[in-house]
Amino acid sequence: MQRDFIFSSVIENAIHGIVLLNKENKIEYLNPSILKMLGYNLKDRKKLIGKSIFDCFISEKQEKIKELIQRGFKEKLTEEIQILKKDGSTFWARISIFPNKKDGKVFNVTI
């Protein structure tokens, strides 16, 4: 229980944006930092959970991003991509993608 609280606190208070995606590229979690970077607030989080990452804030060539995310389910990688903000503006960000595993099976990726 204490460990879960610590983990949750670290993620929620991290200065880096964190997104968890499932295998269908649907958003499972966004931390407050990524919401702020993208121009959203905490009230928007519930609306974004379950949506495709491509519908929310990926603006670059989608095939390239889809390929990166699919590779991220197999290996750790870092890449620069252009990200779409809520207001329609974009910014460049260096993202890292890595698989999250349980019992040797990948269940989602962290970006």
Image (spheres, grey):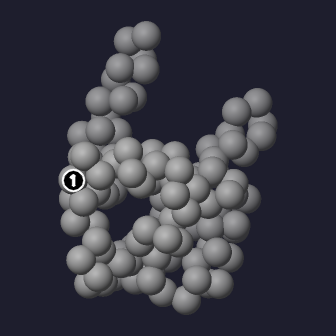
Residue 44 lies, in percent from the top left, at 29, 52
Q: Determine the residue positioned at 69% across, 68% down.
A: 71
Q: Residue furthest right?
A: 104
Classify residue 56 by image quadrant: bottom left
Name the foreground residue: 56 vs 97: 56
Q: Does 83 sit left or right of 38 as displayed?
A: right
The residue furthest front is: 47
Note whether residue 56 is visible: yes
Residue 53, above or below 29 = below
Residue type at mark 1 is Asn
Q: Residue furthest bottom?
A: 61
Question: Horizontal and vertical percent for residue 50?
Answer: 53, 50
Query: Which residue is label 1 attached to?
Result: 41
Residue 8 in the image: state x and y as whole percent.
36, 29
- Residue 65 in picture, x, y percent from top left: 58, 78
Question: Total of numbered circles in the picture?
Answer: 1
Residue located 38% across and 77% down the image: 83
> Which residue appears at 76% of the width and 30% of the height?
103
| Residue 91 visible, this angle | no
**Residue positioned 55% across, 63% down in the render:** 52
Q: Is residue 13 left or right of residue 69?
A: left
Mark 1 is surrounded, within 10 Å at the Cα level, by few (under 14), some (14 to 19) or many (20 or more) other residues, namely: few
